[in-house]
Image: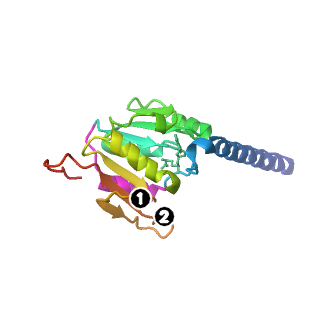
Amino acid sequence: MVSYLIFFTLTVVTVLVVFKIILVGSIVGAFPVTQGAMFHPTARIRLKTALDYVPMAKGDLLVDIGCGDGRVLLAAARRYGACAIGYEINPLAYILARMRTWGKKEIQVKYANFWREHLGRADVVFCYLFPDVMGKLAEKFSRELRPGTRIISCNFPLPHWQAVKVLYPPSSLYGDPIYIYQVSPPAGTKASGM
Ligand SMILES: C[S@@+](CC[C@H](N)C(=O)[O-])C[C@H]1O[C@@H](n2cnc3c(N)ncnc32)[C@H](O)[C@@H]1O
């Protein structure tokens, strides 16, 4: 019995250590592309707060640029019947996202650098990245997103953009701001609601 317990404990510890090594390796390997936006999944309460405020119609397209383990894609599909595309460059996160969304026809997870993808089809863009890239991201959004497209940016604002709302999840641990934006329609036309 004791030897079984020791064997079991050693196996669990080994698996955890190997997982940690792979996790750190994949983060370090992806660093030149991610520029500091490491794999760090959004907490459930934060995701709920964001999606409460940004309803989607069935079939709307949510794009998560840096989709991590795919939880945002899954939540949008489950809650609103949305279609979802996630781009991910960290191999471990990509595999987790593929596993998590396996068999869901409305969700696509692509192993790709989102900077090389055009985001023009998105109805909603979700991002949880890093301050260093937010200026460049704002320029990409201005070039590619259609008027009316909504943007959910976790933790970090888009410089020089006016948020329509800043959400603070009701949590002492996960209460960092979530910025909501909507791409302006051309001058002279009316903005739609959230
Ligand atoms: C903070 S995590 C957020 C994950 C997920 N969006 C969530 O909220 O749970 C940021 C993710 O973006 C990915 N990422 C950063 N830059 C990327 C890029 N240029 N192309 C694709 N993925 C990128 C990272 O690998 C990381 O998994």
Where residue 110 appears, x then y in whole percent?
A: 49, 32
Magenta stretch?
Answer: 43-58
| Residue at disc 2, secondary structure | loop
> Would residue 82 be visible to someone looking at this image?
no
Residue type beneath disc 2: Tyr
> Would residue 64 be visible to someone looking at this image?
yes
> Residue at left 52%, top 54%?
132
> Residue at left 29%, top 38%?
60
Q: Nearer the viewer, residue 25 or 160?
A: 160
Where residue 61 appears, x then y in whole percent?
A: 33, 38
Where residue 94 appears, x then y in whole percent?
A: 56, 37
| Residue at disc 1, secondary structure | loop
**Is 36 located above or below residue 117 in the figure?**
below
Pointers 1 and 2 in contact (CB under 8 A)?
A: no
Q: Which residue is mark 1?
A: 157
Circle 1 residues within 10 Å: few <14, some 14–19, many ≥20 = many
